[in-house]
Structure formats: structure tokens, C-alpha cells
Amino acid sequence: AQRVTQPEKLLSVFKGAPVELKCNYSYSGSPELFWYVQYSRQRLQLLLRHISRESIKGFTADLNKGETSFHLKKPFAQEEDSAMYYCALSGPSNDYKLSFGAGTTVTVRA
Amino acid sequence: DVKVTQSSRYLVKRTGEKVFLECVQDMDHENMFWYRQDPGLGLRLIYFSYDVKMKEKGDIPEGYSVSREKKERFSLILESASTNQTSMYLCASSLETGDYGYTFGSGTRLTVV
């Protein structure tokens, strides 16, 4: 069965400091991994996906198949990065659904 | 922009009531999903639908059912509400198979008393 683990429920960093949100997964095939974000009073939205290999709002995430990880990183956190972040995993190509982790709440302090 | 609209932002229902949560999307998306969002548990999939009148169980379907009579509307039904179904319910849609860029609704906070 596929599973996504986000070991940190809460993460607090100072503005300008690096931030890293951990995500580990268990899946026997070739997964697709995603990060979703929910800002205060806003809808959950896609932040980035590993296949696009892009940087969004300064965030990057690298899929490490050896360590089955997909950690989200930003070198210099900003106050507007304060949000709930979810790591998500897709299943087989004929599967329609995403499995989400428990989420990490990030607070960036001034 | 695709919009996913959930009919109620807040609902309070009594134990044993039958509860309907409605979700409508306006961009002809094939797939629709119902998740519940609980602190410390993240998002858990209740049911999803990949076509009109088609439905599939997610990870926690017990106590719930769904209906998709029209492509744009996906309803979640709590047959007999219980206090452990107090939660935030999120509806989402995606264009087609393999599209994991879900569009989420703003959620319905359901309290069962």
C-alpha cells in the first residue's frame, strides 16, 4: 500500500532562514510526488510536482528514490510562506487519486 | 479559473440526521473527489468519481455514500451522522486521468452534535 509520511507536525523558522519540510513515501512502483499548500483562509492548492522540476515561490523539491523522500526546501523563508503544507503521492497510471500526508504547519517568524 | 463550489461553509447537524454535502465544478472536469481533513491525520479520501454515475471507494468510505448524476455535481451523503464525522470536508476535481493538479473547494466545516 502506498503511504506518505510527514514527520513534522509543526515547523517554526525565522525570516531569512532556510526551511526544509520532510516527506517520505512508501510505494513499490514509480510514483509521482507533489506538494500542496494551504494558506490561512485560502483553498488548498498545488505548489509543485516533481516531474516539472521547477521552482515555485522559491521552493524546490527533489525526488530521491533511494531514500524514498521528496523534501521541500527554500533557502530563505519569508513570512508569507507561513501555511500548512501537504506532501502527496499518486499511484499507478490508471489510478485517479492522490494520497496525502498528515501535513506540516510552517510558521515563519519576523 | 476552474471553480469548485461547496454549498455550505459551516453546518451543524444532530446525531442520526441524514446530511448532504454538495459540490459543483464549472469546468467540465472528469474526476471529482471527497476528502476529509483532520488535524494530525491530513487529508483522507472518502470517495471519488471518474465519470457520471461512476463512483469508487476511497480509504475511509464507511458511513458515507456519494451521488454523481451530472458531470458537474458530486454529492457526499452521511446516511446517519455521528459525532466522529465532525470534520472539515473538502471537495476537489481534476480534468482527467493522470491529472493530479486538483482544484479544491473552500471546504465545509461539519459539526455533528
Image (cartoon, rainbow, N blue to C red):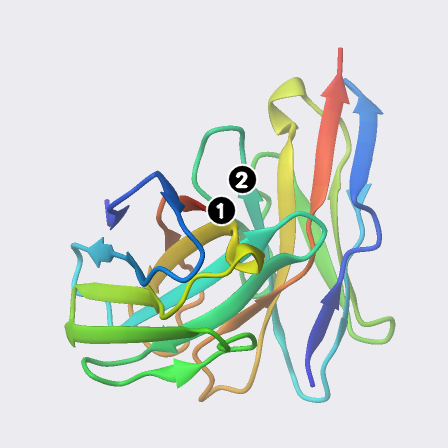
In the rendered image, residues at marks 1 and 2 fall on the same chain: no
Identified at 57% across, 34% down, the residue is: A57
Quarter of the image for the N terminus of chain B: give it: top left
Amino acid residing under circle 2: Gln
Q: Secondary structure at mark 1?
A: loop
Residue that protrudes farthest toward the top in the picture = A110
Would you identify the image quadrant in which residue A82 lies? top right
Q: Secondary structure at mark 2?
A: strand
Residue under label 2, please give it.
A38
Q: Nearer the viewer, mark 1 or mark 2?
A: 1
> Contact, CB < 8 Å: mark 1 with mark 2?
no
Q: Nearer the viewer, residue A29 or B19?
A: B19
Q: Position of residue A95 (x, y in %)?
A: 47, 84
Chain of the residue on which disc 1 is drawn: B
Q: Say few, some or many: other residues with alpha carbon within 10 Å of mark 2 (under 14 / 14 to 19 / 20 or more).
A: some
Q: Position of residue B67 (x, y in %)?
A: 24, 74
Identified at 41% across, 51% down, the residue is: B14
**Count of residue discs:** 2
Whether B81 is drawn above or below B66: the answer is above
Q: Nearer the viewer, residue A74 or B97?
A: B97
Res A18 seen here: no
Whether residue B87 sits left or right of residue A84 in the image: it is left
Res B9 seen here: yes
Q: Which mark is residue A103?
A: none
Identified at 41% across, 64% down, the residue is: B34
Would you identify the image quadrant in which residue B22 lies? bottom left
Whether A50 is drawn above or below B2: the answer is below
Chain of the residue on which disc 2 is drawn: A
Residue under label 1, please give it.
B113
Amino acid residing under circle 1: Val
Q: Position of residue B33 (x, y in %)?
A: 38, 67
